[in-house]
């Protein structure tokens, strides 16, 4: 391996040397100037798209990447997901959906480049923003600030990834596809909130990254103070107002949001391709030279990888390639045509700053010319209501409202962002005939709840401290003695239970019966449950099933945010008045029986006895697992 990578590097240096001697004096590797990223001496307009490797299966990768190439992309951008790669300290995993090297080599095989966003903080609607939960328990740690234990851990993982990439010869300077990297993610607002410590950490992160000597530039997105030579970049729905923090850095857009993520029960967002194309064309006409679609293929949050809380398992994102790997039309096709028009204009675009002239109140021309006679023009109409007929170079052009026409030769408009010429029929997902689906159910056994794997304490424990995120579920169980003299026992009004939770959702069981549920939201994880409870004389059992629905992935020091039932827990309406249960004895059980039995295993390796759903339909069971196999082939025409 070692010899192989050394010989590849030598070959590459030799190759560069040849260029140097026979052609002209060019700089090998990847650099940049104020106009663009420069690859082996050539300024490039780079069209990139995010495809996160663990959000699809390795079997899908080649097809997704080939579709990206066919769609006119030059670069695939991905984050690196620390918690997937280091599930426990020093225990690494790079297999299956986490086979980062295989993913990058698949991109390389397709002839595309890679932008590797190591982070290792990634945000990304990913559980805990990509940090392993064990990191929170490193003594003295404080995330994403000038804190030695954090910096040590961050450096360790970053180094590990860079080393892995180097030993596989994956950097461009070694003949590999990686042309760019990223350290941190959108740290700008955090840096300001953390004051001097934030600034010191940000400078440290940049220096640490640059010292790793990858031979390719580092980017810090949404970090206006990114120190040289790190490039600051924009993220957003529009980025035409963005200017890099130094005049000698290129204008880069690391996240052009193609749609948006979804929350459970929330809106499924869509972004019209006309607007996305307009935003991209507007960025390029302003002098932008790198644009990345976030996401180009969003994919799926498998298992318990979704963050939030309450981010859905689908991360489709209304991206040009949908969750299932199918091209989404007309988004995919219209962007492909946009990319073609931009590429036809590339030589002029990278050669000079645009000359801007007014063509009307809301209309402008941006004209790029090169010394060797190339000319490209972008004609824009910013009026969102009315079309305009403009005169440019003695010719008339019709510009629909809120649109940009691209003229790669300054004469012929080959593309207009608002004129969707590709297939306009849209694919509709229809529910399959549910009778063909054979649903099965498995009842979660609550009869032995509280008999094994119990932790006891007086008072309420924070959920993640107990589960260490090994499960979403934590049972909080306690007993309540009710005096036979209570008036509600003879048909009077039941007492009311109130439960304060720091998040995220909860089911309340009284003596084994589901009594009610409550939940917070992504913005406000806390909630208070209030409900009447059916209690009897003697001992009653309260079992609260607290559910963490994806750990937060952003917010200042989210590692300190609590989860679970933290009180107060109170019973109201007893003769004695309010009874506070918060500080009495509570027992805890981590996870569900079904999890321990691995009922979610796709290969069915589980001792669970599943029942046909039709047979189970009449039964009243509050906690039930459902599964369905769909092996039917859907005919296409
Ligand atoms: C950005 C962030 C991404 C992702 C996106 C929303 O601010 O950098 O990681 O979270 O928002 O999908």
Image (spheres, helix red, strand yellow):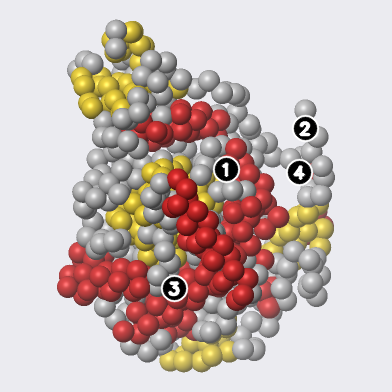
Does 183 appear above or below 429? below
Q: Earlier in the sequence, mark 4 or mark 2?
A: 4
Q: Position of residue 555 (x, y in %)?
A: 33, 64
Q: CA distance from mark 1 to mark 4?
A: 34 Å
Q: Residue 158 bears which disc, if any?
A: 3
Dots 4, 2 in contact, CB < 8 A: no
Does 450 appear above or below 502? below
Q: CA distance from mark 2 to mark 3?
A: 46 Å
Q: CA distance from mark 4 to mark 3?
A: 47 Å
- Crowding at label 2, few (<14), some or many (≥20) Cα neighbours within 10 Å? few
**Secondary element type, mark 4:** helix
Q: Residue at x 56, y 62 (%)?
A: 11
Q: Is residue 13 left or right of residue 102?
A: left
State whether residue 191 appears in this view. Answer: yes
Dots 1, 2 in contact, CB < 8 A: no
Residue that label 2 marks: 636
Does 510 appear above or below 30? below
Q: Earlier in the sequence, mark 2 or mark 3?
A: 3
Viewer-nearest residue: 595 or 161? 161
Q: Position of residue 154 (x, y in %)?
A: 40, 76
Dots 1, 4 in contact, CB < 8 A: no
Q: Residue at x 17, y 70 (%)?
A: 195
- Crowding at label 3, few (<14), some or many (≥20) Cα neighbours within 10 Å? many
**Secondary element type, mark 2:** loop
**Secondary element type, mark 1:** helix
State whether residue 563 appears in this view. Answer: no
Residue that label 1 marks: 68
Q: CA distance from mark 4 to mark 2?
A: 18 Å
Q: CA distance from mark 1 to mark 2?
A: 23 Å
Label 2 CB-ligand 1 distance < 8 A: no
Residue that label 4 marks: 434
């Amino acid at each position: 391996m070692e010899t192989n990578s050394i010989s590849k590097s030598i070959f590459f240096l030799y190759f560069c040397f040849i260029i140097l001697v026979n052609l002209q004096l060019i700089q090998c590797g990847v650099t940049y100037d104020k106009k663009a990223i420069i690859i082996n001496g050539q300024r490039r307009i780079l069209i990139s798209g995010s495809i996160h490797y663990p959000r699809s299966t390795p079997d899908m990768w080649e097809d997704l990447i080939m579709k990206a190439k066919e769609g006119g992309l030059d670069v695939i951008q991905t984050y690196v997901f620390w918690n997937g790669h280091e599930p426990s300290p020093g225990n690494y995993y790079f297999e299956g959906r986490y086979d980062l090297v295989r993913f990058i080599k698949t991109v390389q095989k397709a002839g595309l480049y890679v932008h590797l966003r190591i982070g290792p903080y990634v945000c990304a609607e990913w559980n805990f923003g990509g940090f392993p939960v064990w990191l929170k328990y490193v003594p003295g740690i404080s995330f994403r600030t000038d804190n030695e234990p954090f910096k040590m851990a961050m450096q360790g993982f970053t180094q590990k990834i860079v080393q892995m990439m180097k030993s596989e010869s994956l950097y461009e300077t070694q003949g590999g596809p990686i042309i760019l990297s990223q350290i941190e993610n959108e740290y700008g607002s955090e840096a300001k909130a953390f004051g001097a410590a934030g600034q010191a950490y940000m400078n440290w992160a940049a220096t640490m990254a640059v010292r790793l000597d990858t031979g390719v530039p580092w980017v810090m997105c949404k970090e206006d103070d990114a120190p040289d030579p790190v490039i600051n970049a924009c993220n957003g729905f529009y980025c035409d107002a963005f200017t890099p923090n130094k005049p000698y850095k290129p204008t880069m857009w690391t996240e052009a949001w193609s749609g948006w993520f979804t929350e459970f029960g929330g809106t499924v967002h869509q972004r019209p391709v006309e607007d996305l194309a307009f935003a991209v064309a507007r960025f390029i006409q302003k002098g932008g030279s790198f644009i990345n679609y976030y996401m180009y293929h969003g994919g799926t949050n498998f298992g318990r990888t979704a963050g939030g809380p309450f981010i859905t398992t689908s991360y489709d994102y209304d991206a040009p390639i949908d969750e299932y790997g199918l091209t989404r039309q007309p988004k995919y096709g219209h962007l492909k045509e946009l990319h073609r028009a931009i590429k036809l204009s590339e030589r002029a675009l990278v050669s000079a700053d645009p000359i801007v002239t007014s063509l009307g109140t809301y209309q402008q021309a941006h004209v790029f010319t090169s010394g060797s006679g190339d000319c490209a023009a972008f004609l824009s109409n910013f009026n969102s209501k009315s079309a305009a007929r403009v005169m440019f170079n003695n010719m008339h052009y019709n510009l629909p409202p809120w649109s940009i026409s691209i003229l790669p030769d300054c004469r012929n408009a080959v593309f207009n962002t608002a004129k969707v010429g590709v297939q306009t029929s849209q694919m509709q997902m229809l529910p399959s005939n549910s009778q063909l689906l054979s649903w099965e159910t498995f009842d979660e056994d609550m009869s032995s709840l509280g008999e094994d794997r119990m932790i006891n304490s007086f008072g309420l424990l924070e959920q993640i401290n107990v589960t260490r995120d090994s499960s979403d579920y934590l049972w909080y169980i306690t007993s309540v003695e009710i005096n036979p003299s209570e008036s509600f026992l003879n048909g009077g009004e039941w007492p009311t239970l109130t439960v304060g939770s720091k998040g995220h959702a909860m089911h309340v069981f009284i003596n084994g019966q589901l009594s009610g549920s409550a939940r917070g939201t992504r913005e406000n994880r806390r909630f208070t449950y209030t409900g009447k409870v059916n209690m009897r004389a003697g001992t009653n059992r309260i079992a609260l099933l607290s559910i963490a629905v994806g750990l937060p992935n952003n917010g200042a020091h989210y590692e300190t945010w609590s989860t679970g039932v933290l009180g107060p827990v109170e019973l109201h309406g007893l003769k004695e008045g309010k009874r506070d249960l918060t500080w009495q004895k509570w027992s805890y059980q981590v996870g569900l029986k079904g999890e321990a039995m691995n009922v979610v295993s796709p290969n069915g390796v589980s001792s669970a006895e599943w029942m046909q759903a039709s047979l189970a339909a009449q039964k009243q069971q509050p906690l039930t697992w459902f599964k369905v196999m769909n092996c039917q082939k859907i005919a296409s025409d």
